[in-house]
């Protein structure tokens, strides 16, 4: 039997590391028009992948969209909230919407899809994913503007310790395949536009500051969303430690990045979940 959630209670959403590109939703409560659909889609509870290699998150290929080990909260953020000029968040009560993770494989029967860039594919996928969430999760939501506590990432005294570089070329075809080819052809070099963590250090190669906010929130143990107020608009190379001095404290981002976090309250476009149900696996 499906378990249901009702009552819009607000909590902050864990930021997903994807670039922002589309327009912000209106500030007044509004419903989203019913979009086009995937041709076929499979949704299953995620298995335990502890200690197993492989990726988690979102992926688009020449004919499909995949989400691996993603909560409904994360799926909503990708489908609805991703991309506004101001930070956006999902409002919901802690429970299965946050804790239960899902694997989705959805196919697109459209020969033109293979010729799109990765960004263009993501823009096409989002309305399809909205329709899938409405159909399979019986998701109903609306948007509001809410005054919300956040941490603003700002430049510290002396300025940011980053190197501005040219923007990476737009990925053509499957991003995973493109990354694999690049690493084979350029051993030891980070893939342009990527952000990777290994051991006690994370390295960014030609990324915007906005794409690393979620990781900064996570490694600094921040209890609120982190927003970008650095004034840095380009693409940058940089690196920072993921552990503090005794391996238990948060890292010193001011020392590594020349940036710091300031506590603020700002109006955020907030996606309020009115109701949702667990889908049956298929």
Image (cartoon, rainbow, N blue to C red):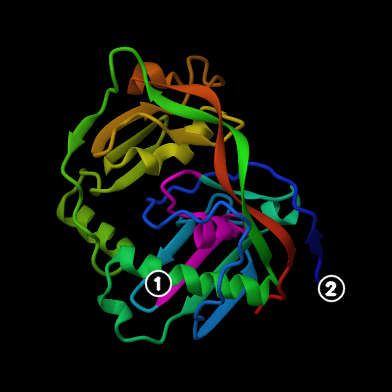
Residue where numbered disc 2 is placed: 1
| Residue in the image at 41% along x and 22% along y | 253
Q: CA distance from mark 2 to mark 1?
A: 33 Å
Above or below for 112 versus 124? below
| Residue in the image at 50% along x and 74% along y | 128
Above or below for 80 versus 132? above
The residue nearer to you, when weighing 204 against 18, is 18
Q: Quadrant of residue 69?
A: bottom right
Horizontal placement of 76 versus 256: left or right?
Answer: right
Horizontal placement of 132 versus 110: left or right?
Answer: right
The residue nearer to you, when weighing 90 against 54, is 90
Above or below for 205 versus 158? below
| Residue in the image at 43% along x and 53% along y | 83
Residue that sits furthest to the top in the current view: 157
Above or below for 54 versus 109? above
Residue where numbered disc 1 is placed: 124
Q: Which residues are magenta?
A: 64-87
Give residue 245's position: percent from left, percent from top. Answer: 48, 14
């Amino acid at each position: 039997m499906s378990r249901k959630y009702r009552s819009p209670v607000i909590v902050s959403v864990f930021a997903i590391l994807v670039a922002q590109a589309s327009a912000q939703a209106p500030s007044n409560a509004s419903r989203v028009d019913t979009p086009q659909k995937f041709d076929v889609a499979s949704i299953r509870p995620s298995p335990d992948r502890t200690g197993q290699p492989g990726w988690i998150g979102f992926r688009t290929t020449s004919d499909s969209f995949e989400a691996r080990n993603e909560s409904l909260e994360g799926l909503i953020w990708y489908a609805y909230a991703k991309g506004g000029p101001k930070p956006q968040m999902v409002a919901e009560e802690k429970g299965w919407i946050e804790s239960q993770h899902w694997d989705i494989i959805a196919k697109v029967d459209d020969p033109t899809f293979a010729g799109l860039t990765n960004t263009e594919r993501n823009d096409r996928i989002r309305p399809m994913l909205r329709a899938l969430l409405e159909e399979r999760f019986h998701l109903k939501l609306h948007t509001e503007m809410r005054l919300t506590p956040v941490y603003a990432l700002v430049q510290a005294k002396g300025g940011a310790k980053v190197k501005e570089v040219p923007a990476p070329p737009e990925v053509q075809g499957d991003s995973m395949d493109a990354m694999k080819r690049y690493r084979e052809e350029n051993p030891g070099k980070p893939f342009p536009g990527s952000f990777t963590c290994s051991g006690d250090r994370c390295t960014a190669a030609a990324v915007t500051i906005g794409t690393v906010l979620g990781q900064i929130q996570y490694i600094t143990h921040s209890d609120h969303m982190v927003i970008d107020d650095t004034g840095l608009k380009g693409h940058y190379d940089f690196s920072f430690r993921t552990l503090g001095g005794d391996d238990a404290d948060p890292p010193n981002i001011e020392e590594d990045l020349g940036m710091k976090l300031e506590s603020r309250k700002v109006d955020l476009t907030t996606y309020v979940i009115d109701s949702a149900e667990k889908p049956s696996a298929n």
